[in-house]
Image: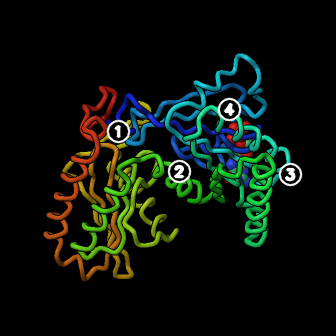
Amino acid sequence: TTILSPDQKPKILLMGLRRSGKSSIQKVVFHKMTPNETLFLESTNKIESENISNSSFVQFKILDFPGQIDFFEPSFDSEKIFGGQGALVFVIDAQDDYMEALQRLHQTVLRAHKVNPHLRFEVFIHKVDGLSDDTKIETQRDIHQRANDDLIDAGMEQIHLSFYLTSIYDHSIFEAFSKVVQKLIPQLPTLENLLNIFISNSGIEKAFLFDVLSKIYIATDSSPVDMQSYELCCEMIDVVIDISDIYGKDEGVQVQFDKESSSIIKLNNQTILYLREVSRYLALVCILREDNFDRQGLIDYNFLCFRNAIQEVTPSASITSTPPSTTTHF
Ligand code: GDP
């Protein structure tokens, strides 16, 4: 069995103080809300659990906690909440005084670690769109230092925290979520290997395997990721979705892809964006030089080999299960 099978869903717990931006993150990443619309979101005041596995390759739960929840209250079932495979994402509002948030982070991490030593801790230093570049770095350094000092003081320096600078106003939130989700995918090394083989045999510069719904990339080849390439590929997905209107807007968030469909965009700088559907959730988006696209037959062929290999390493449930009846077909 694997973590991607439906009976063993890894969980992502989204936590943080009130107004830190949890609901906004969830809406922007998984519900296509625009950042400006989040201004009108009501603050979270209960534990919300959302299972997005029906519409996304990545099967996990988001538990949106109100900031004020009391862990030590008997009704708080920490075994149930922190148990299982997953990651705890703690959101800190970087535009606000973050001392209280740090204290909260510390308590949460200690508590959660005690219940589940395998849980991963991911700290989103959020709303950094309002900060200058220097302040961003300084804030990250300060938060990192204080959070780790607190752990050392508590004799828990073995707990590892990862930090990300995020904002819903750019792609940083998608990038951060990609990294968090990738750590929960046991086949990641295999997927990366397959991508490496595919790109080197096809003259491709960069390839991302995307969860189409969320635009999280669940794997990429081992060359470094630059933000611009990632954004380009995200935008390509949006364009393809808009053009083919695959997106069943009136019927929830189901995405349907035809297995044969593909899309090619030529940019005016001799670059090509090449998109192929891998499954109804996954798309491969590649960046390559126009010269190398002369051999499109080879690339298409290599893609089919790649897709077959992917289907072998990921459970059939996630790749080929029959779409729910609400799905729109075009
Ligand atoms: P929650 O209580 O943690 O769920 O917080 P909300 O999602 O309701 O967000 C509180 C406020 O923060 C809202 O007005 C959002 O528009 C705003 N917000 C969320 N994310 C960002 C961000 O990345 N940058 C900025 N500038 N504001 C944000």
Disc marking residue 180? 2
**Image: 128 above or below 9:** below
Badge 4: residue crowd in 10 Å (few <14, some 14–19, many ≥20): many
Distance between the alpha carbons at the discs numbered 3 and 1: 41 Å
Q: What's the CA distance linking mark 1 and mark 2?
A: 17 Å
Q: Of 304 and 316, which appears nearest the observer?
A: 316
Q: Secondary structure at mark 4?
A: loop
Foreground tag (2 vs 4): 2
The answer to which of marks 2 and 4 sits earlier in the sequence is 4
Position of residue 317 measured from the top left corner of the image (x, y, whole percent): 28, 35
Q: Earlier in the sequence, mark 3 or mark 4?
A: 4
Q: How many marks?
A: 4
Q: Are marks 2 and 3 in contact (CB under 8 Å)?
A: no
Q: Is residue 329 left or right of residue 249?
A: left
Relative depth, front residue between 299 and 76: 76
Could you tell which of marks 4 and 1 lies nearer the N-terminus?
A: 1
- The residue where tag 3 is placed is 97
Label 3 crowding class (10 Å Cα cut-off): few <14, some 14-19, many 20+?
A: few
Q: CA distance from mark 2 to mark 3?
A: 25 Å
Residue sitting at x 76%, y 20%: 73
The alpha-carbon separation of the residues under discs 2 and 4 comes to 18 Å
Quadrant for the C terminus in the image: top left
308 vs 268, left or right, is left
Q: Is residue 252 above or below residue 154?
A: above
Check disc 1 and report the residue beneath it.
Answer: 2
Question: Which image quadrant shows ligand 1?
Answer: top right
Rendering quarter of residue 254:
top left
Q: Earlier in the sequence, mark 1 or mark 2?
A: 1
The image position of residue 177, as x and y in percent, is 54, 51
The amino acid pointed to by label 3 is Asp
